[in-house]
Amino acid sequence: MEWLQISVSTTSECAELVSMIMYDAGSEGVLVMDDADVKELVEKKLNWDYVDEKLMRSLTGKAVVSGFFSVDFSAAEIERGLASLKENSVFPVGSLEVSSVKIDSADWENEWRKYYNPINLGKVVVVPAWQKAPDGAAYPVYIEPGMAFGTGNHETTSMCIELMQDFELKDKTVLDMGCGSGILGIAAAVLGAGAVVLSDIDPQAAEASAYNAELNKVSDKCKIILGDLNTDSCKADLVIANITADVLLRLRDQMNDLLKSDGAVIISGIINSRGGEIESAYRKLFRIESKLCRGEWQAMLLRRI
């Protein structure tokens, strides 16, 4: 189905008012891309340790509000609303420049798929769900990422999959904390783990993990938990956490409590500048068996002392 996407360049202060104009004109939904939101998230540092400087340099301080209409829609009502806003607003409104483009929803929703190809990670080959595994792939892991993080492309994910192959997984119990698409826990199941618990606080991640477990025919091994793990969940031979340095610091003691006496952890999502801090904190409870560094990131396989 074709849609007409109408976009208006404005300011952060007026983005909500422009959104209301879109809705009043009959938009099926509104997309707001606001530089101020990005800056706020970066400054709070709640969910990551590293931000590409190119992203920060690309921010221009404006907001773009887009509405979606039938292809025969006339923008006259939107233009009237914007003229009224410009005349009456006590806030700066920006340029209020209007642009439009026709989009095909099927092409739009699936455009990103063409950029994904199978990824070889040791014995594991991560295969996009819409493609076939390469000939001779010993352990294919099919992934439909949806809206969840984890396709195998990012260094933090690929290093975890490589490190888990240094651990004897056959019939072992694995916990995947912050599972995203489920790729790490599902890879462990495909490699022979007997039971896998995948947890995440994001409902979309839980849904994606359940779907991917079914896709790889390992649902019988996998338990999906929406929320945080606790020591009642089970005791694991291996805990995997691909998160951020700050969260890894907070979860260190919990990971230790979730492990069997001879258990191990794989941690990733560690920006190089935080590597020494993480090592120092984890050495109090674990010894480092393996460590990988790739690009800006580090991952570690640690054994409980």
Image (cartoon, rainbow, N blue to C red):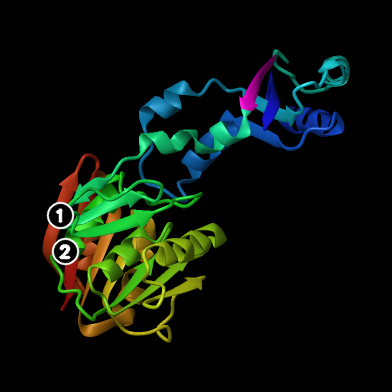
Q: Residue at x 35, y 59 (%)?
A: 183
Q: Position of residue 205 (x, y in %)?
A: 49, 59
Callouts 2 and 1 close, C-beta under 8 Å: yes
Left or right? Give the position of 216 relative to 1: left
| Residues shaded magenta | 99-103
Q: Which residue is mark 2?
A: 165
Looking at the picture, which amino acid does disc 1 mark?
Gly
Q: Residue at x 25, y 84 (%)?
A: 260
The numbered disc on residue 122 is: 1
The secondary element bearing badge 1 is classed as loop
Q: Is residue 118 above or below residue 221?
A: above
Q: Position of residue 300 (x, y in %)?
A: 19, 59
Left or right? Give the position of 14 relative to 239: right
Q: How many marks?
A: 2
The overriding secondary structure of the stretch rendered in magenta is strand
Q: How would you rate the neighbour count of disc 2 (Cα within 10 Å): few for under 14, some for 14-19, many for 20 or more? A: some
Quadrant of the image occupied by residue 29: top right
